[in-house]
Image (spheres, rainbow, N blue to C red):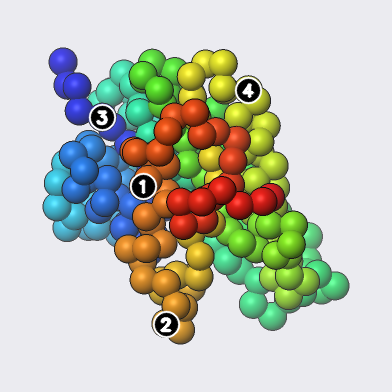
Amino acid sequence: MNTRKIALVTGGNRGIGKEIVRQLAAKGFRVVLTARDPKAGAKTASTVKGDVEFLALDVADDRSIVQAAEDFGKRSDRLDVLVNNAGIYPDEGFNILTVPRELLVKTFQSNTFGAIRVIQAFLPFLSRADQARIVNLSSGYGELGGLSSGVPSYCLSKLTLNGATIMLDQALRNGGIAVNSVCPGWVRTDMGGPNAPTPVEDGADTAVWLATEAPHSFSGKFFRQRREISW
């Protein structure tokens, strides 16, 4: 029986997700890296040192989520950590007065509904783990005090993801599953851009801490730099 803890990271082929995969693998986790692009995902998984494997998963597609859960079940009967990292940032050229409905729907499908549906699909595996943990990658743009009219769909999707974290905590706490949101800060990635002040290692740190070392009693909270922040 494999006693090594297993983690699944969505959108793990680049940026913060890739770094979370790297840090978890360095801590001895068996890590399942997921991505919607099979070539990119498999290539990244092969380059990360440690016990890392690839699983195809498009968080915006329910059929892909169901298939991924089915495929995962052939590899393991439990999941100790789920990191909902996959997301998009598509608001360039729009504000709250001009953003089309189609863009709002597209962003919510990836950033919010995807995380909820992945949790639903992988809940049987999380329920079999001892003190399972769920980490949702949110943003300061999802804080009530951090909303920006110039980043409409992204802000609203992360604000709603934070609300889902609160509700998921209510639903999962009695089952021994902790769930929290994380603001990684403004990180130097393809999404954050080259001028971002935070290196990717620091951007991944709090998510990895919540996935591994933070007290399991921490649940239904929002963190930045390992400190709880307000919604």
Numbered circle sitting on residue 171: 4
> Which class describes the residues within 10 Å of circle 1: few (<14), some (14-19), or many (20+)?
many
Numbered circle sitting on residue 5: 3
Name the foreground residue: 70 vs 113: 113
Helix, strand or loop at label 2? It is loop
Name the foreground residue: 45 vs 185: 185
Numbered circle sitting on residue 194: 2
Numbered circle sitting on residue 42: none
> Which class describes the residues within 10 Å of circle 4: few (<14), some (14-19), or many (20+)?
few
Examine the rendering and report whether any part of residue 33 can be seen.
yes
Q: Give whichever of discs 1 and 4 has the lower sequence position.
A: 4
Compute the Cα span from label 1 to label 4. Answer: 23 Å
Q: Is the residue under label 2 in contact with that under label 4 (CB below 8 Å)?
A: no
Residue receiving disc 1: 208
Residue type at numbered disc 2: Pro
Quarter of the figure with residue 130: top left
Residue type at numbered disc 3: Lys
Helix, strand or loop at label 4? It is helix
| Residue under the image location 24 percent in, 57 percent down | 44
Residue type at numbered disc 4: Ala
